Image: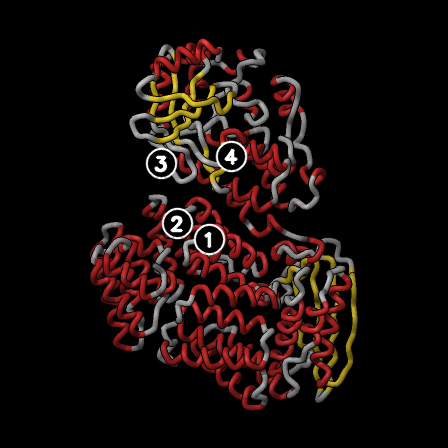
Amino acid sequence: MRPEDITLLTSALAGRYRLERELGRGGMAVVFLAEDLKHRRPVALKVLRPELAQSIGSARFFREIEIAAQLSHPHIVPLYDSGEAGGFLYFVMPFVEGETLRDRLVREKQLPLDAALHVARGVADALAYAHRIGIVHRDIKPENILLQAGHPVVSDFGIASAVQAATKVKDKLTDPGFAVGTPAYMSPEQSVGDVVDARSDVYSLGCVLYEMLAGDPPFTGATAQAIQARKVMDTVPRLRTVRESVPEGVEGAIRTALARVPADRYASVAEFAAALARPEAFRAPARSVAVLPFLSLSGDPENEYFADGITEDVIAQLSKIRSLKVISRTSVMMFKKRDRSLREIGALLSAATLLEGSVRRAGDRVRIVAQLIDAETDRHLWAETYDRQLTDIFAIQSDVALQIAAALRAELSPDEERRVHREPTRDLQAYQLYLQARHWFVRHTADGLRQAIDYFQRAITRDPEFALAHADLAQAYLEVALASGAGLLHPREAYALAAKSVTRALELDGTLGEAHCMLGFLKYVHDFDWAGAEEEFKRALEFSPGSADAHDLYGRLLAALGRHDEAIRMEARAQELDPLSHRTDLASALLRAGRYEEAVSAARHAVELDPQYGRARATLGWAYLKLGRTEEGLAELEQGAALTQHDPMFLGQLGEAYGLTGNVEKARAVLHQLTEAARLEYVTPYYRAYVHTGLGEYDSAIDCLEQSLAEGSGGLYGLKASFLFAPLRGHPRFTALLKMLNLE
């Protein structure tokens, strides 16, 4: 704008806005910092360039602005006002303290991976919301992404739409002073003036994320025509050539977003975001290992627990080494029958190397054969045979772990090496009782828990200083407590026994990661000591950095506190370490964060892995319901309840869904079913609170929650951030309950 234009504009706006200084200018508008005189607040006032305003016309401009004014989202800069003054068209937004993404890129050139993905997720959330109501941005670029204390917000919705509607891009490409959109970030179809849809914004976001990681957009050139030609003729430059540390999965997701043909891109920005959140996107191939179940060659089925125990212990030893990614037990045990090739197993577990082994036990001697294999090439990296006394079992396990670390060139600190060498017990019979306890525990049934507790107690009787047995006994008691007693103990009694066991474990070994993890879990699910729990999880990850359970339980804590971005990162890491066990937890974290499209994608992935997994079905059902897809949501929740044999938790959630969707009779039937079940065995009233909430009976729901607190049962720790109890927020009794839980 010329000085005389600014003078004219200042005069025309007098009494409504006072221009203070120019903040910047681009191809479509000049931005001023102004004071809103009516409301006494600073604002960003954007004035369209005169030639652009004339091309659009005020009627079309106001029509498009009116559509953009409907947007209300945490990651979108809202529209305050728009108008015409002195022949100039303008629109007004809040003045966002901070900087644009462009400012940060000028300063840093390349962003850390976590920071870049954080920005991309925020922008994706904004775009997914806008796309659902039919608005395509058309001008996603670093200049239109504002960072407010690191929180990304998108500006200028509707402006590019107005321009696109009134002009032909192909007629303007030859004019270097005028551009609809920004060539470096425009999709190929937008560059030539074709009709665009949400996939055009997917392309633009892919360009922005590429630049955040590489330092430059994927395609550059001296003119708009040159950039357009490169997009049509050239392949996307390899991102890892510029920045080798970018995970292959992240680069692959970006390349899909940047596909030349819209049909080859992600169908929605939510799918793009979900691909970036998947653990396989962060695969670290050089130092990732899965320990496959050791085969028992003893001929006696009773010795199978011993081979399984060796598998678990080698995994536990490797998990103490921070520079290794070690797949957890639950996922690897699914391949005990070896019904897939090593390459397939490696791909499913995102593990570049696999440890295979066999165990033959005869009397007091044991023969263990172990071999480390490259999953992709089937090349043997290391192999060893151990023919020793049974009393040498711990030395063998330590040696296997250290040999794997050496073969993968993983660095060990002196402290890590000391922990790998530490023997859990010197009593071999206590160790065998412990292995039998673990063999029962992983069945996750009431009978399995009963048998596990018995064997853990017998192991501790043999060796009262067996710290790991105390820690695992605490875990068994916690599982009993969280399963409403599992028909074995009242939850309050189970919590007390868990506290006693974990305290003893830490008295015996203060560096035992498993014990710190269980204490952290106990502190927040029972004591509601949030700060203390977080400290314990940090200690757990310090001593066992490869523990999937510690990452998962820490992620649940963060979600309960409403720290959703942190929770999602923690759950993504848990799923990376245990991809077939924690497959629904990432979907649940996305659901709690309100990222419903991504939750659908993650939950579908879990269902595809195991269509009979009830928890995955229920999670998918809630994600559908939150998107307004009622029939699909109820169908999935009904399947979830059926597949879990009508577990009271999933039955209660189904009852709530019935109530919320107007199926009152079905909701009442579920409530009756839960009440009758409680007459036969203990069922926490927490589950009845779900149904009352769905029926709008908020006082009855809170009655159940208060009873649950008095009885020490149910998932009360999740109340604050639970979308299932969101209707209760603001109720005085609910607020009082949160205070009792140290959540207010």
- Where 128 sits versus 87, above or below? below
The answer to whether residue 219 is left or right of residue 725 is right
Mark pair 1, 3: CA separation: 25 Å
Do we see residue 194 in this rendering?
yes
* Residue 72, disc: 3
Q: State the residue position of label 1.
A: 587
Q: Which of marks 1 and 3 is nearer the N terminus?
A: 3
Most extreme residue toward the bottom is: 462
For badge 1, the amino acid type reads Ala
Q: Which residue lies at the image location 45% right of the left edge and 36% below the top edge?
A: 97
Total label count? Answer: 4
Q: Which of marks 4 and 1 is in front?
A: 4
- Residue on which disc 4 sits: 99
Badge 2 element: helix
Label number found at residue 623: 2
**Percent position (x, y) of residue 738?**
32, 61
Which sits earlier in the primary sequence, circle 4 or circle 2? 4
Amino acid type at circle 2 is Ala
